[in-house]
Image (cartoon, rainbow, N blue to C red):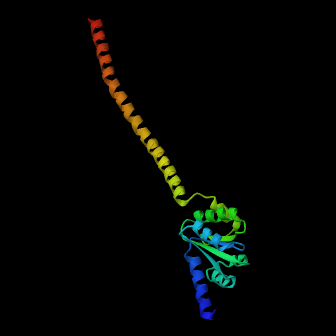
Amino acid sequence: MVNQEKIDAVDRIAKSFEDSTAVVLTNYRGLKVSEMHALRRALGKETTYTVVKNTLTRRAVAKAGLEELGEHLQGPTAIAFIQGDPAVAAKGLRDFAKDNPVLEIKAGVFDGQAVSADSVNQIADLEPREVLLAKLAGAMKGNLTKAVGTFAAPLSQFARLAEALKAKKPADGAAEASTEESTEAGES
C-alpha cells in the first residue's frame, strides 16, 4: 500500500469506530468464506463485518480514543461495526459462535467504552431495544394509572361524604320537626 492509501484506510476505520453505535472485535481464523457470508447475513443489514489489518486498526483506535482495544488486535481480526441495536448484533455473533466455535469474540465497544468479550455476551442476553422500551412504557402507564386513582380517591370520598350529609340533613330536619310537634303536644 502506498502511504496515502494507508492514511485513508486508517481514517476510514477510525470514522467507522466513531459512527457506530457499537463495535465487536473477533478472531475469524478457521472460518470458510461461505461461513463468513452466513455470519454477515446473521448480523443483519445494520452491521458491517470487515476483515482488517491490525497495524492500521491500531492507529485507527488510537485516533478514535480507544487505545485499550490495541491489546486485542492480535492474529486475524475482523470487526463488526454496528449501526443499529447492539443487542441484536451481539446476539447474532454469540449464536453464530456457538454453532462455529472457531469464531472468537475478543472485545467490543459500547457507548464509547471498551468492554470485554464476557460483556459482549451479556449484552447479547439483553432483549431488543423495542421490547425494553415497550416494557418501560407499560410500567410507566401502570404507575400513572395508580397515581390517578390515588389522587382521585380523596375527591370521590369527599363527594360521597357530601352526598351522605345532604341525604342525612332532610332526615334530621324531619326528626327535629317531629320532636317539636311532640313537645308542643305535650305542652297542651
- Residue 122 lies, in percent from the top left, at 66, 61
Camera-nearest residue between 53 and 10: 53
Q: Residue at x 70, y 67 (%)?
A: 117
Camera-nearest residue between 112 and 27: 27
- Residue 56 lies, in percent from the top left, at 66, 85
139 on left or right of 184: right
Camera-nearest residue between 166 and 68: 68
Q: Residue at x 32, y 13 (%)?
A: 179
- Residue 82 lies, in percent from the top left, at 57, 71
- Residue 1 lies, in percent from the top left, at 64, 92
72 on left or right of 4: right
The answer to which image quadrant residue 169 occupies is top left
For this orientation, the residue located farthest to the left is: 188
Residue 35 is at least partly visible in this image? yes
Callout count: 0
52 on left or right of 148: right
- Which quadrant of the rendered structure holds the C terminus? top left
Q: Is residue 61 above or below residue 171?
A: below
Q: Residue at x 59, y 65 (%)?
A: 42
Q: Is residue 5 above or below residue 42?
A: below
Residue 113 is at least partly visible in this image? no
Q: Residue at x 53, y 56 (%)?
A: 131
